[in-house]
Image: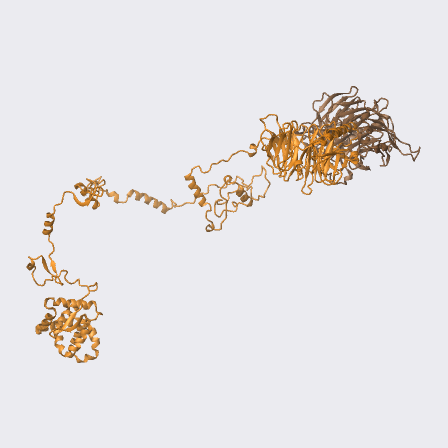
Chain colours: A orange, B brown
Amino acid sequence: MSQLNGSRKRKLVTRALPDVRDDSDELGDALLGGILSQSDDGEEFDDSDDEEEDGEEEDEGSEDEMDGEEELESDEIPSEYGEEDIREQIRNLKTADVESPKGANGRLVKVNGAELPQAATGALGETNTQDDIEDLKPNYTVTTDANGNPRYLYQEIEPGYESDDSDAPATVNTIGEIPLSFYDSYPHIGYDINGKKIMRPAKGEALDALLDSIEVPQGWTGLTDPATGKPLELSREELEVLKKLTRNEVPEEGYDPYPDMVEYFTSKTEIMPLSAAPEPKRRFVPSKHEAKRVMKIVKAIKEGRIKPYRPPEETEDEDPKVKRYDLWADEAPRPDHVMHVPAPKLPPPVHDESYHPPPEYLPDKAERAAWENTDEEDRDREYLSRDHDALRKVPGYDKFVKEKFERCLDLYLAPRVRRSKLNIDPESLLPKLPSPDELRPFPTACSVVFRGHEGRVRSLAIDPSGEYLATGGDDGTVRLWQLRTGRQNWSVKFSGDEAVNVVRWRPGTEAFILAAASGENIFLVSPPIAGKPDVERSSRDVLDAGWGYAATNGASATNGPAKKEAAAKWTRPGPQLEEKGVLVKITVRSTVKVINWHRRGEYFSTVSPQGQSSAIAIHTLSKHLTQLPFRRLKGLAQSAQFHPSKPIFFVATQRTIRSYDLARRELLKILQPGAKWISSFDIHPGGDNLIVGSYDRRLLWHDLDLSTRPYKTLRYHKKAIRAVRFHQGGLPLFADASDDGSLQIFHGKVVGDLMENATIVPLKVLRGHQVRKELGVLDVDWHPKQPWCVSAGADGTCRLWQ
Amino acid sequence: MSNPTPAGDQAKVRIQLTTRHADLGLPQDTGPLLVSTSLRRIQLSSLVNNILSTPRPVPFEFLISGQFLRTSIDDFLTRNGISAETTLTVEYVRALIPPTYVASFEHDDWVSSVDVLSASSPAAGWAGADIAAGQEKILSGSFDGYLRIWDTSGQLVATSSPTSHGQHPIQSTKFLSPTKLVSAGDDCCVRIWNHSNPTNTDNPSATASITPSLELYGHHGAINAISVHAPTSRILSASSDHTLGLWSTQKSSAPAAPSDLFPENSPSLTSSNKRRKISQPTPPPPRRGPLSLLTGHAQQVSSAVFAPNDASVAYSASWDHSLKTWDLPTVTCVDTRTTAHPLYSLLALSGITLLAAGTSARHITLIDPRTSARSIAALTLRGHSNAVVALAQEPGSWYGLVSGSYDGSCRVWDVRSVRPGGADIGGGQVGESVYRIGRESLGGKREPSGGEGVRVFGVCWDKQLGILSAGEDKRVQVNKGS
């Protein structure tokens, strides 16, 4: 309506212009000013002004009282008085057209030069006015031309999206109102605004003519084959393929992208169904027969013959004849008995896998501990029942990731775990050792206690006849005891306060000679035994034989080339000691710790660990001669011993045991027991085996034929092993003495067969000695024939075990 | 007379009373008796006394299948699972009265052996002497080398004079007759002593004396034990030089002594003149040598005894586990029995042909020395915890014996109280001790390990005096069943 209104207004304006022109004489300046100030798109103001003027005119013409409400009225006009106003204007238009067409035309011609575009320009101005109401800047400047008339110089209109001129015809003939036929002979059809020719557009004939004029060779593409550099020529088929490719078609020959549909199932409704018979009526009529039956039932129900639900009959009617008893009515807990039948227990409710199991299923502490202690594979079930108050308190499954991982491993490497569980009793894998009971006799209990020494008993030895026991201790005495009764028979105190470190009997029963070492002195003693004057005499003979030798041969020898210091001095100990039976005193350079006799009783070796080159000495009894077989010894000498049957000499240093051939004077073997510090060793009477005790608690059995490494290592003691000793009288026994106050008795059977290894069975731990100042049992010795052993303790006692 | 009136509701058992005591045998006509099972030893004892109608009631013990009845018969039957319907064979024996401590005779040194001269002792029996009650003498040999004679009141009657060459421990001593003693010890010499016993009326100031009368040389090692037989005037000695010595107590019948064994020939003595001076004052007694030295043992001979019935047979036990039977007239070893353990002591049980041998393995083995005997150990008596070194038989009984051990106790055994032993001891029969006698010197304390300080070296059982034991606690302890 408004648009319509607008368009009419336009017409009105165009037509009203002459009125304005009329009034321009009077109000020219005012109008000009308004127009100037408002530019061409302020024509609406003109309109409004016109309207106001119209209104005023009307007001003036019809009702003069309306002056006070002029403004309001002017605003209201377009809506309220639309139709009335339009009719009025149409009337005016007619009149105006009639009255002054010349004037209007004349001005328009002057401005635009032509009548025809006037409406167009007017319309153009109208639209601009409508679009840019606020843009009120003047688009032109007014100058005076040569004739003195005002000249409007319009600024160039900048094309933009705002200046929409889509309403204007797209193609504008810029050649004016000249028929195109005038240009038929020219290649151009007009001129543009700059005066340049507008060329005639090419026509089909011309293109065809041009194309026809160019001859294209067959298969020409205008491309160059990149491989050959020649022009690329394509055959028709290839071109066809390319064409299809460009169209996204399957380039295959004969491929039909749209084949006819094969109808496997018809989409059409068949005219003829399978049976042409029409549905019988009874299909649609309720069955009378059924109705009859239903009615029958209904009637029966009504009459009460059929009851819709009858409670199940209680079948187990109490038979009054059968008497029944409740066995467990008032059952009290009774002890287990065959005749006692406990009340059957109902299974507890729910199950133990529940998150909130009944308390019967909850494991107690012992069960839990047992479950946790068993191997994961051995558990009877994989879970432990756990109690949670609520399901939401149940924690996440803790093994989830692990199980998933294992499952993955299962899939990846199928036999992931080899179940190498052996159903073998570990006991059966142990080598069959005979039971100690079968290996009797061996010492089991303390039989006699020899008490008398003040301070430690350092060393002890049973005499070859098995009747007497000699001991030496820290109190500097050597004591002789009757083994059977434990009675001290004799004792001697050597000069000085030095402890008696070692006592050893000379082998052989024909003489009764004891070698004892106290400090640097070695004493050879023939203890006076009552009733044995003949033995005593022979002992003295053995001991005294050397004096003569020393007097004759020895003197001449010393006078000769031997100028260096003698290895040892053989002297008489003095009358006081001689009276006690001490017959020979040998002084060596340093403290003697170990004495061992050669089996024949002719030689004995002494070891003084601190003695450097004189650490090991071999003494010849019959010649009163001392030899130092080793100029230099690697390591501290610990012990030395003669082989029981061969001319072999064993020397133990801290780490190794070396055996030397005395006849050929060469090193035979180096045994490496692996112990850190050897304390003592002993050679099996057979000569092929050797036991080594070490301060690092080890007892090692060496088979000399087997290896330089120990055949067996026994580590049963808690503290250092001080002494080891084989039974020399044919019983397969050996013993060790340790600082933990105990002795251990072993069965060590050596078989003559080379293929068979020695059998070693621990038999008995003998306890009884007290540990004094970290020292327990210091020495051990065996009875020459009986399965008895004696031990020397740091508590000042010796004990006979049998 | 025989059947006691049975109470109505009490269970009865049929018993057959037997005994091995010849003087206490039942009358021939006594058949099985029906007695109440609630009877105990005392009731049974009075029953047997009734049957025997003994003038004075004799206390009896009752052996049912080798076990002494200590409870009621009912208990015994249920414990051993014996039906009450069978006829029980009940052996009644004279009860061994539990020995109670009587006295201790204190010595200066360890006491090694003890012997008694009393009316029932063999020495008195051989001599035909009549020793009045209260006049018994106790002889003890000590490690200090002295013999001592005590009277029953604990009074020291006499001490032996010192020997010529120092004192050496005496290991064994015996009464040969009321006036003669024999001792042997570590000096390898068997000595015969005269014991002069001045009567009180003669000279109150004169003291009894023990002076050596004969020295028998020949052993090269300490003598562990001696055994005497006065009627044949023989002494048997067991020495640690592996031999047995057979000696004569008579100077005239004994050969000359080997002079090289005389102590004055010892080089340790010849070297110093001082000793010789000391040894001079009393002229040495005559010296003789052995009738023979029986060799055959491989190790120390610990004990040698005459056969109780035949003095021409001797038995010896040695550390080499063997027990040998010797025929003395021909000086040959007749039989050798090898046991499993070193033997420390030997006792020939008179009346039953068994030898009891104490071993170092803490038990006593009863050995049948007859060549026909198949098993070596007829019975093993177990209970000691250390070597058994002394044995003595109960006087007047064939079955009782007492043993002294290094564990510091004496035990009284009855060889009739036996039960079959397990396989661990060779399948023989095992007996248990009836009583145990500890050392009073301990004051009730437990024996130390190894019996240290209280070891028993010698025992003697006399009818009048009871059980005498000598030990390391320097005492002779007298225990007597009241």
| Residue found at the far top of this picture | B330
| Residue found at the far right of this picture | B202
How many numbered markers are drawn? 0
Is residue A55 among the parts visible in the rendering? no
- Position in image of residue A90 (x %, y %): 12, 71
In terms of depth relative to the viewer, which is nearer, A740 or B177? Answer: A740
- Position in image of residue B186 (x %, y %): 79, 30
Is residue A256 among the parts visible in the rendering? yes
In terms of depth relative to the viewer, which is nearer, A162 or B334? Answer: A162
Vertical arrangement, residue A200 with respect to residue B405, above or below: below
Residue B271 figure quarter: top right
In terms of depth relative to the viewer, which is nearer, A312 or A420? Answer: A420
In terms of depth relative to the viewer, which is nearer, B227 or A749? Answer: A749
From the viewer's perspective, tell me whether residue B323 is left or right of residue A117.
Answer: right
User: Looking at the rendering, in which quadrant would you find the C terminus of chain A?
Assistant: top right
User: Looking at the rendering, in which quadrant would you find the N terminus of chain A?
Assistant: bottom left
| Residue found at the far bottom of this picture | A65
Residue B465 figure quarter: top right
| Residue found at the far front of this picture | A560
From the viewer's perspective, tell me whether residue B250 is left or right of residue B72.
Answer: right
- Position in image of residue A730 (x %, y %): 67, 27
From the viewer's perspective, tell me whether residue B105 is left or right of residue A799.
Answer: right
From the viewer's perspective, tell me whether residue B175 is left or right of residue A690.
Answer: right
Residue A122 figure quarter: bottom left
Vertical arrangement, residue A232 with respect to residue A640, above or below: below
- Position in image of residue B18 (x %, y %): 75, 27
Tell me which residue sits at (50%, 48%) in the image.
A387
